[in-house]
């Protein structure tokens, strides 16, 4: 194949396919290049309210109505029952001590449940990437995107048009010239290697390794440990089992498969293969019980060093997707919103291909700022995994910023949330966030850190996260948003109208 395109996107994960659809809607000729083929396994599976809102914005802005049902669990089930996903009502955390049974404490100090939706219909989802990514590739093809799978690119060079990509698809040579090229192949990806781009480590973030696979027959935690009064069934969420030095995730899909794995400070545990997984579970009796009858559906995958940060993100006729520019850790599911924010920025680049430089510069600056901010918080959490009180408090920085950002955008007031992930340019919250993180790195007294976190989130807390009487169990209540209307520069009537548009059904008041 020898052809010229306006846009070439390397990597057909969800981000590459979404950007290919946008580029086609903008009137460009587009080629989407994939080294492997679909369906395939991919890590990164848990969406968030902000991620789903960004996907909704993309669907609306670029006339992609078939994407809209994917933004909520209920509409997904009706529109695409054959594309597997999981129900995600929030974030569930349990803190464990090695070699000790887990038991619920009266003050719930060793757990944290933060709701993200008031009911299943409008809930978030876990994306079963084998089917989700394949669905998006087919959607891109239906719009006229040229798709080349099983294509190995071996070289890249400049050309009069932009970049020249060379390689092979089976026995056939591939020679493509594109005005603009996007690398969506992940950390240490195609353009990073081809251009020899520098790597710039995150300060304070330890080297982290991961071990993960897909299981069947994983017991529900809430059947082993009944959770009366929880804001949602704890397993219908992103479940986190936290212990000193690392954490285990469990994400349930509707097809009976559970994605599970561990991320931990490198060298703390022997995690090279399934034997390492079994040894770790032996130290965590309650988690061992949850996986007592679980069977891995595929060999374990071992990632030796998860964090990655490229020192460069864009050039005159190319750019890295945020997922190719930086990766921190799956903790808090920050990857999807970071990537979708980047897709929106790259869409602006594609609108201005004749003069892309200012938009490319903004994409590079924002991408690095956002991944750095996520890394700051994740590093602070790793530093305090042995201190549940501090860990739980620090997560509230994320939940407060994310819920504020989502609500501001849904109200049509995106300027309130600024232009940076986790309110990085908010006049009051941004410096207070920095102080909280600094105290966490210093291993300051837990009481002082909690106090500082509550001070930091006060101007943006619209979800009742400052209410200590809820004892680490936060549901989603219309009254919280109504009471915080002034923080969003809104009237209660505006809040009610927003809730109606979003399909919110008011929950009863929380019971302490």
Image (spheres, rainbow, N blue to C red):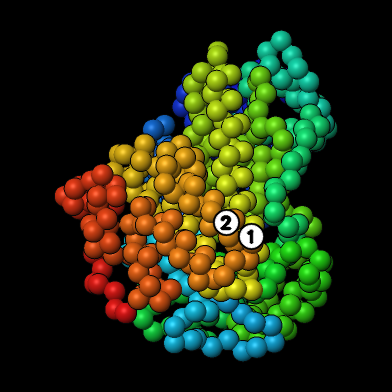
What residue is pinned by disc 1? 441
Residue 274 badge:
none
Looking at the image, residue 67 sits to the left or right of residue 462; the answer is right
Indicate the position of residue 485 as horizontal and vertical percent values: 24, 52
Give above or below for 145 relative to 257.
above
Give above or below for 72 relative to 143.
below
The residue sitting at 43% across, 73% down in the picture is 472
Foreground of the two, 325 or 354:
325
Give above or below for 5 relative to 152.
above
Residue 440: quarter of image:
bottom right
Foreground of the two, 65 or 370:
370
Q: Residues within 10 Å of mark 2 (few under 14, many from 20)?
A: many
The residue sitting at 46% across, 81% down in the picture is 108
C-alpha gap between disc 2 and disc 1:
6 Å
Indicate the position of residue 450 as horizontal and vertical percent values: 48, 67
Identity of the residue furthest to the left in this view: 493
Identity of the residue furthest to the top in this view: 160
Indicate the position of residue 221 as horizontal and vertical percent values: 53, 80
Please say whether residue 172 is visible from this viewpoint: no
Dot 2 falls on a residue whose secondary structure is helix
Please say whether residue 442 is visible from this viewpoint: yes
Indicate the position of residue 121 as horizontal and vertical percent values: 34, 61
Q: Are discs 2 and 1 less than 8 Å apart at CB?
A: yes
The quarter of the picture where the C terminus appears is bottom left
Looking at the image, residue 104 sits to the left or right of residue 315; the answer is left
Q: Residues within 10 Å of mark 1 (few under 14, many from 20)?
A: some
Dot 1 falls on a residue whose secondary structure is helix
What residue is pinned by disc 2? 437
**Count of numbered tags:** 2
The quarter of the picture where the N terminus appears is top right
The residue sitting at 48% across, 72% down in the picture is 112
Give above or below for 213 relative to 361.
below
């Amino acid at each position: 194949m020898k052809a010229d395109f306006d846009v070439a996107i390397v990597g057909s994960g969800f981000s590459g396919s979404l950007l290919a659809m946008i580029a086609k809607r903008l009137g460009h000729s587009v080629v989407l290049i994939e080294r492997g083929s679909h369906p395939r396994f991919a890590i990164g599976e848990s969406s968030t309210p902000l991620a789903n809102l960004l996907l909704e914005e993309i669907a609306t802005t670029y006339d992609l109505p078939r994407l809209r049902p994917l933004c909520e669990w209920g509409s997904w089930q009706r529109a695409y029952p054959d594309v597997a996903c999981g129900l995600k009502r929030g974030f569930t955390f349990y803190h464990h001590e090695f070699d000790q049974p887990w038991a619920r404490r009266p003050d719930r100090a060793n757990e944290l449940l933060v709701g993200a939706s008031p009911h299943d219909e409008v809930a978030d989802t876990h994306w079963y990437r084998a089917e989700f990514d394949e669905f998006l590739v087919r959607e891109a093809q239906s719009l006229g995107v040229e798709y080349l799978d099983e294509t190995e690119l071996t070289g890249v060079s400049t050309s009069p048009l932009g970049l020249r990509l060379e390689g092979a698809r089976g026995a056939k040579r591939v020679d493509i010239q594109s005005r603009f090229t996007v690398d969506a192949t992940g950390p240490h990806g195609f353009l990073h290697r081809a251009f020899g781009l520098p790597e710039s480590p995150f300060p304070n973030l330890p080297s982290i390794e991961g071990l993960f696979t897909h299981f069947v027959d994983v017991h529900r935690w809430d059947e082993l440990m009944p959770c009366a009064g929880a804001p949602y069934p704890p397993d219908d969420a992103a479940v986190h089992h936290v212990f000193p030095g690392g954490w285990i995730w469990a994400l349930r899909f509707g097809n009976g498969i559970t994605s599970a794995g561990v991320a931990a400070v490198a060298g703390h545990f022997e995690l090279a293969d399934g034997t390492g997984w079994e040894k770790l579970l032996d130290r965590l009796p309650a988690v061992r019980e949850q996986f007592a009858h679980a069977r891995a559906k595929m060999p374990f995958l071992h990632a030796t060093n998860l964090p990655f940060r490229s020192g460069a993100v864009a050039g005159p006729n190319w750019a890295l997707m945020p997922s190719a520019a930086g990766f921190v850790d799956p903790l808090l599911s920050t990857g999807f919103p970071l990537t979708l924010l980047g897709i929106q920025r790259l869409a602006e680049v594609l609108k201005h291909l004749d003069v892309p430089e200012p938009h490319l510069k903004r994409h590079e600056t924002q991408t690095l700022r956002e991944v750095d901010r996520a890394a700051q918080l994740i590093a602070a959490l790793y530093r305090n995994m042995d201190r549940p009180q501090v860990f739980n408090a620090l997560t509230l920085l994320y939940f407060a910023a994310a819920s504020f950002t989502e609500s501001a955008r849904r109200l049509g007031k995106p300027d309130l949330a600024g232009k940076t992930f986790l309110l990085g340019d908010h006049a009051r919250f941004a410096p207070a966030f920095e102080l909280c993180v600094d105290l966490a790195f210093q291993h300051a007294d837990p009481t002082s850190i909690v106090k500082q976190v509550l001070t930091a989130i006060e101007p943006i807390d619209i979800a009742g996260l400052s209410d200590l009487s809820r004892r680490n169990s936060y549901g989603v209540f219309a009254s919280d948003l109504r009471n915080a209307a002034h923080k969003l520069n809104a009237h209660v009537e505006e809040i009610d109208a927003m809730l109606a548009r979003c399909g919110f059904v008011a929950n009863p008041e929380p019971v302490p």
